[in-house]
Amino acid sequence: MKDGSLTAKCSGLVTDREDRGCVERAKAARLPIKIVEKSERESRELYDKRLDESIRSFLPSPPLPLSRERERGDVIAALGWMSILSPWFIHRWKNRIINVHPALLPKYGGKNMYGDRVHQAVLASGDRETGITIHLMDEGVDTGKILLQKTCPVLPGDTVESLKERVQGLEKEWYPKVLQMIEKNEMQVG
């Protein structure tokens, strides 16, 4: 957004903890921020309803009726969100939650496959390439419709850190491009 290549408007940041790096970046960009912490006794769905309320607080008022809500084209760009969302939340935002996974799904996806664990699995497999998958979130874990995949080589001597750096380079390049394609109606998500 800073260099103008992404013209979509970011309405705000919702995160579960204040100590995340995204909070500082959002403050620097003067974006509104909501911290929605989950208590241990709170159900997933109750938490997700509070999450939904926080997200909707950033949207223009008055809200559209639920039957016309999708017309506005709002999407949630999930970045580093490590919690499984409830079916209620997924249904509420159906085909409007975009996520990036640090591997070529369906390989190395699913429960407990995130972060360094993905890169360790890729290195242990002997695969010669890996990459990213930008996909819609659904009720499963890393099972939503794939919007885009980009590859990079796994090089001899790669470590988790060197591979992670190469994959994150793809994420930084392509996630904004996908959001821009959605903004310009060049990519259909639903």
Image: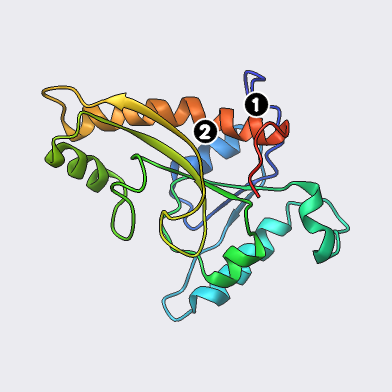
In the image, 26 versus 112, the foreground residue is 112
N-terminal-most mark, 2 or 1:
1
Question: What amino acid is found at the position of numbered circle 2 in the picture?
Answer: Tyr
Mark 1 neighbour density, 10 Å: few (under 14) some (14–19) many (20 or more)? some
At horizontal 48% and vertical 52% (from top left) the residue drawn is 18
Residue 67: % across, % down: 82, 64
Residue 24 located left or right of residue 142: right
Extreme residue in the top direction: 3
SS of the residue under disc 1: loop
* Coloring basis for residues: rainbow
Q: Position of residue 44 (x, y in %)?
A: 49, 74
The local secondary structure at tag 2 comes to helix
Q: Position of residue 15 (x, y in %)?
A: 52, 53
Whether residue 118 is situated above or below residue 148 in the rendered picture: below
Kindly indicate whether the residue at mark 1 contacts the one at mark 2 (C-beta within 8 angstroms). Answer: no
Q: Marks 2 and 1, how far apart in space?
A: 10 Å
Image-based side of 39 in relation to 127, left or right: right
The correct choice, above or below, for 172 with respect to 188 in the image is above
Which residue corresponds to mark 2? Answer: 175
The residue that mark 1 highlights is 6
